[in-house]
Image: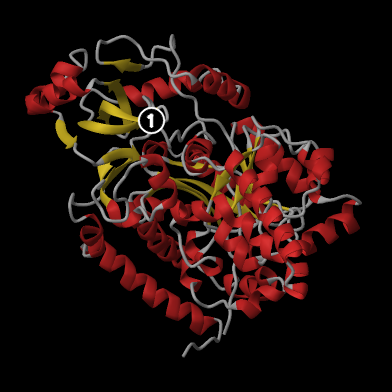
Amino acid sequence: LVIALVCIIPCASAFVPLHPGTGITSLHRASGRALHPRSLPQQYQRAKRMTKSPNLVQSLRGAAEGGAGANLKLLLAEKALIDGSMQPAAVLVKGARIQHVKTLTSQDFHKFKAAEGQAAAQLFPEEAGCESAEVTVVDGPDLLVPAFINAHTHLAMGAMRGLTGAASFQGNVVEDLFFKLEGSLTSEDVKAFVRMGAWECLMSGVGTVWDHYYYGHAIAEALADVGLTGTVAPTLQNLAGPALVLPGCGEEDTLQTTHDIHNNLQWKEKGIVAALGPHATDTVSPALWRTIADTATALHLPIHSHVAQSIEELERSHDTHGCPPVSFLHRHGVLSAGSGWMMVHSMFVTQPELDLLLPDKHVLGFCPASSVQFGFPCDYHGWVERGLEVAVGTDCAASNDSNNVQQELRLLAAGSVFGVTRSAAFKAFERTGSIGEAEGAQGVRQAEVARNARIDQASRLTSAVWEVPGRMHSELPTGEILPGAFANLLLIRGDHPNLWPLRDALRALAFSNVAPAIDNMMVAGEWKGVRGGFHESLYSSKLYQEHREEADARFQELLSRCGLLLS
């Protein structure tokens, strides 16, 4: 049996890096002088354009300051990724957020390291209670970097991993296979399956997900159970799809679920927030799109949706609306709605439609490994050359087999060169074997490699799993080590053989297999494992075992309800 999956998408709001003059604790050098990274003013202006929220800075300030008895943790790192480069730094975490960041000289780093328990009070005398802060030292070759962000997931679909094969992707696997299975899901199924996906994310170094699926409450509860931050976009459908038959997933109920997640202060404190989640232009009516646009604008939320993801969606848009999907959204004023857009897949988008997109408003979601299995990679290089922002996700395990978003970056960087062997020049060489035709194929190769070199620097690649998605939602700033951001951080073993000899740390983080080198991980200010035994401590925990047992049982029950038997 082969079963396929549906993809959905996060959206683009803005992360507001804390700006001088806001009253929020700023980034400092060891001398105490405020450090204003080159990118901060630009980011701040971008955030202002995207959010248009007069209360955003004040809300971030309150979140960063925390309560009087907020838990304090000091991370003293010899190599921390601050403003795009590795440098010594002290990072003070208060509650779920980063409160202060100070860059240090090498000499000062070793001085404060020797101070041990007194380091926090010496570094941040203005912060009450620093003398009792928990101190973690990251020294030698080890690295302190932001946790990764998986910008497009359907975590519950991990239950279908391995049920699809090459034959499944010849047609529309979403409609032909997946919708049928999803129509039998319960909210408890989704909760159990999302938990398992969340565990996999943690073990891959992912601290934040943008999840789009049915039963939004269950998704939020599952993320909270495991301790993952995320933006939840409850799937909206009213023309076709499982939402039409799943209890509590109709358009009115799902809009209410979105409101509920948005208004839940406890979830917000844990880094669980809402986005509007229309499924696609062929499963959502024009009237519902208008409601979504109005709601996203009123609540200042991003929209996370599949757009132009299949030939069927394109054909239906032409048949129904007389234009392709992005043009339809533009004509109805939906493209300008909300605090931003995550437009996932976007395979059938024309160049004139790309010209309608704004870098400050629209983020294109790309899932490289999934698109390879679907046989239709997106035009990443063309998007970047147009100045558009790109965020990377894994889609779902049923069409990827992994939720490790960092491993997507190699395909993102060089996937286009696979086209060299399909070029007319190379096919001519295959036919004739002549040196002249071989030189022609080599010319195609050199042109493609040169194009990659202009675009695929490590900093641009990693921005697709850090800064770009980390600034999408004003209430969930992640992906950077900055005051006010959620404290989602990775301790990386720099001496791990996967990274050796670590001559270029940022390149290693983009192209190596980082997950086995994770020494520990913090999400929303809480350590998730045991340092030195991170993966085993998660895998062997009682909580993980309980979650897996429930997921196993529910998956078998789901197959039974669907009348499916697996050998």
Residue plotted at (46% across, 53% down): 405
* Residue 520 percent coordinates (x, y): 24, 48
- Name the residue nearer the viewer: 297 or 129: 129
Residue 246 to residue 136: above or below? below
- Label 1 sits on residue: 85
Residue 446 to residue 437: above or below? above
Left or right placement of residue 234 versus residue 516 in this view: right
* Residue 10 percent coordinates (x, y): 58, 46
* Residue 65 percent coordinates (x, y): 32, 22
**Residue 138 figure quarter:** top left
Residue 445 to residue 52: above or below? below
- What is the total number of numbered labels drawn onto the structure image? 1
Residue plotted at (66% across, 73% down): 169
Left or right placement of residue 319 versus residue 64 in this view: right
- Name the residue nearer the viewer: 123 or 433: 433
Q: Residues within 10 Å of mark 1 (few under 14, many from 20)?
A: few
| Residue 6 visible within the image | no
Left or right placement of residue 326 versus residue 176 in this view: right
Tell me the quarter of the image containing the N terminus: bottom right
- Name the residue nearer the viewer: 331 or 244: 331
* Residue 93 percent coordinates (x, y): 27, 30
Residue plotted at (61% across, 27% down): 50
Left or right placement of residue 335 versus residue 137 in this view: right
SS class, disc 1: strand
Q: Residue furthest front?
A: 435
Residue plotted at (26% across, 42% down): 526
**Residue 203 figure quarter:** bottom left
| Residue 471 visible within the image | yes
